[in-house]
Image: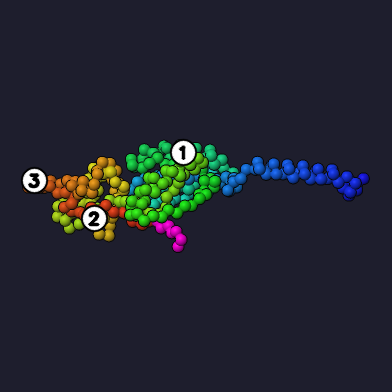
Amino acid sequence: MNLLELIIKRPTIIVVTFIVLVGAGLLSFGKLNQELFASIEMPIITVATIYPGAAPEEVESSVSKKIEDAVASLENIDEINTTSMEGFSYVIVTLKEGTDVHRAAQNAQRKVSAIRSELPVTVMDPSVDVFDINNSPIMTLSVTGNLDDAKFYDIVKNEVTPLFEQIPGVARVNMIGGREREIQVDIDEHRLAGYGLTIAEISSMLASSNADFPAGKIKDGEKQTLIRLSGKFRSVADIKNIILKTLPNGSIVKVSDVASVYDGEKDVESITRYNG
């Protein structure tokens, strides 16, 4: 009896078999794992380092170059690419195909840890990671409001972002755009020279005074020097009243005598748009 005859003479067997196959298929389908991206392991190691308040040139010379030199001795390196920007260093190490990327990452971590003491004190610990496509953003949200730019940024950063970070399964939440609060010190170079002071001296005074504000800039005409203010000051007036120098006649020179201090916003470095 061939298959065709079996189907004609005993249709019940075929129907039952079909139902069993469909049921098994539906049951298996419900148990299938679903992923946004296929699991692909790329031989790439990244080293991310935050250097608060540092200019790109300072990040390049004090952080990026040293980390590059440290990881350059890893085996099976194909290429190394580095990006240095304001307050941030990002080193990408691409390995040759077939390399044990996790073992290489462990070696990279040891090499970076070995040169940690050579990095500036204010640099945060470098983060060594294996590139994983599954860590790519799965959701992009836009936040709008009618508040003052700096205040709105502060609310999103300190109140909204933490709510998303607390959601189970969320590894990281990144903010892009917005206007962050920044204390700006605008130097009058003629007054500065008249008192025999330099921008470096003012920068040092402000940094050592531990002001409780985000990183800011000292501006002198077309030039600007990045500084980090992180500590105990409560207002712009406190910064204006910092004593820079005592003159021979006993009078004192304050920051307000040689500069204007503003409670402003950081320069725009990135722009995001919603509905155009």
Seen from the viewer's position, the closer of residues 1 and 227 is 1
Look at the image and give the residue range highlighted in magenta.
270-276
**Which numbered tag is attached to residue 11?**
none
Is residue 114 on the magenta stretch? no
Tell me the mark number nearer the camera, choosing from 1 and 2.
Answer: 2
Q: Measuring from the top left, give residue 158's x and y in whole percent.
A: 38, 45
Q: Name the residue under label 1.
A: 109
Mark 1 residue element: helix
Left or right: 240 in relation to 28:
left
Q: Measuring from the top left, give residue 111's x and y in whole percent.
A: 45, 39
Q: Measuring from the top left, give residue 160's x and y in whole percent.
A: 41, 46
**Which numbered tag is attached to residue 250?**
3
Q: Look at label 1 and name its amino acid.
A: Gln
Q: Distance between the residues labelled 3 and 2?
A: 26 Å
Mark 2 residue element: strand
Tell me the mark number nearer the camera, choosing from 1 and 3.
Answer: 3
Q: Earlier in the sequence, mark 1 or mark 3?
A: 1
Tell me the mark number nearer the camera, choosing from 3 and 2.
Answer: 2
